[in-house]
Image (cartoon, rainbow, N blue to C red):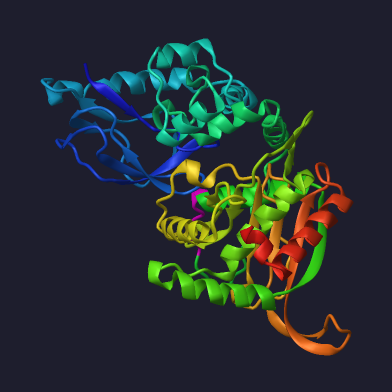
Amino acid sequence: MPIEIKMPALSPTMEEGTLAKWLVKEGDVVKSGDLMAEIETDKATMEFEAVDEGTIAKIVVPEGTDGVKVGAVIAVLAADGEDAGEAEAAPAKSEAKAPEAKPEPAPAKAEEPKVEAQNATPSAAAKSDHGTRVKASPLARRIAAEKGIDLASLTGSGPNGRIVKADLEGAKTGAAPAPAPTTAAAETAASAPAPRPATVPDIPHEATKLSNVRKTIARRLTESKQQVPHIYLTVDIRLDALLKLRADLNKGLEARGVKLSVNDLMIKALAAALVQVPKCNAMYTPDQLISFKRADISVAVSTPSGLITPVITEADSASLSSISTRMKDLAARARDNKLKPEEYQGGTASISNMGMYGIKQFEAVINPPQGMILAVGAGEKRPWVMEDGTLGVATIMSATGSFDHRAIDGADGAELMQALKTLVESPLAMLA
């Protein structure tokens, strides 16, 4: 019997994607694990692997097609020993039935199953789909074993229903109502009139089609500024001790090929400060305040397709060399659109560093559902009152914390910024 290859959900928020490129052609023989296509999701461009073995009988959706719905048939695979020519007829049946499945009366209802999947609430359909075989990434299995989570009770949001790290985080915190604001926002957006397109002035210009990543960035940042009450707190931090420590550590790490950046140390400092002030290592849900026991730091990385935030997990307990090595790897793969969903989903707080561009100070937009983000400016020589009261010159950096005021009070945010300042100005404490 021919096997229908369907558009996968490569992230929990993905509803449709762009089939950017086919890496196989009709007649090719594939086996499990072979790369079949490049798919542009709402987060990044990712490679789609084959699960079953067989021959590509027909490619239903040509490459470059936008708006391909999750679950839509994109190709047909003829199993071993099956006539590929006969298998080509399979999409016709699926396409004939497709119009009957499309006309659902309300978009909000179509989103309800997705909210359940994100909340790891098993349904009868999910159980029948998976049966007794549980598909999960190695990272998800390890976390489940450590936390005592039953994988069979979860609904996977990864490719082909595979359980990924994000699914376990929802189960671990028990924050089932968390996605509710997204549903409410979607219902509001559905009922509101569509914005009128801007009038392009009659000036020579070039129009570039928005990628799914850019559309998602625009939507999430708009929602964040509209729905999250931001409060901003700025401190000036003396960097001289941290710069000296970095230079000393890099001499010792040179033989291992590790070179620490200031950003690596700032990731560590933020993680340590969040553990020291746990009230700021939190997220808001409509009926719960979630406080995290460790600090996973999302780091803003600029890529050709837009901003993405790979996560340094357990940054509070990780060594500086580990943070540096992982960060270089994640940043490189982020720019090549090679990150896995579990590598950019989650995180308890974010950091954005624009110091390399000479930006003195800025206020970053919170990355929901996280409760805060740290904006790091450039270190520069400024007049500074020294410990003995004399006026001198020091290397000073301005850092601004953006806090979700629903989850974090101003005084708690101020305590975090003070803890951060102390750690950076006395950086040996980060190594203890």
Image point (69%, 45%), residue name = 370
- Pick the residue in front: 265 or 124: 265
The mark tally for this picture is 0
List x then y, in percent, for residue 369. 68, 41
Image point (66%, 30%), residue name = 173
List x then y, in percent, for residue 254. 42, 73
- Residue 399 located left or right of residue 147: right
**Main SS, magenta residues:** loop
Can residue 66 be seen here? The reply is no
- Pick the residue in front: 371 or 196: 371
**Range of residues picked out in magenta:** 207-212
List x then y, in percent, for residue 309. 56, 53
**Quadrant (top left/top right/bottom left/bottom right) for the C terminus:** bottom right
Q: Is residue 36 above or below residue 204?
A: above
- Residue 90 located left or right of residue 107: left
List x then y, in percent, for residue 429. 68, 61
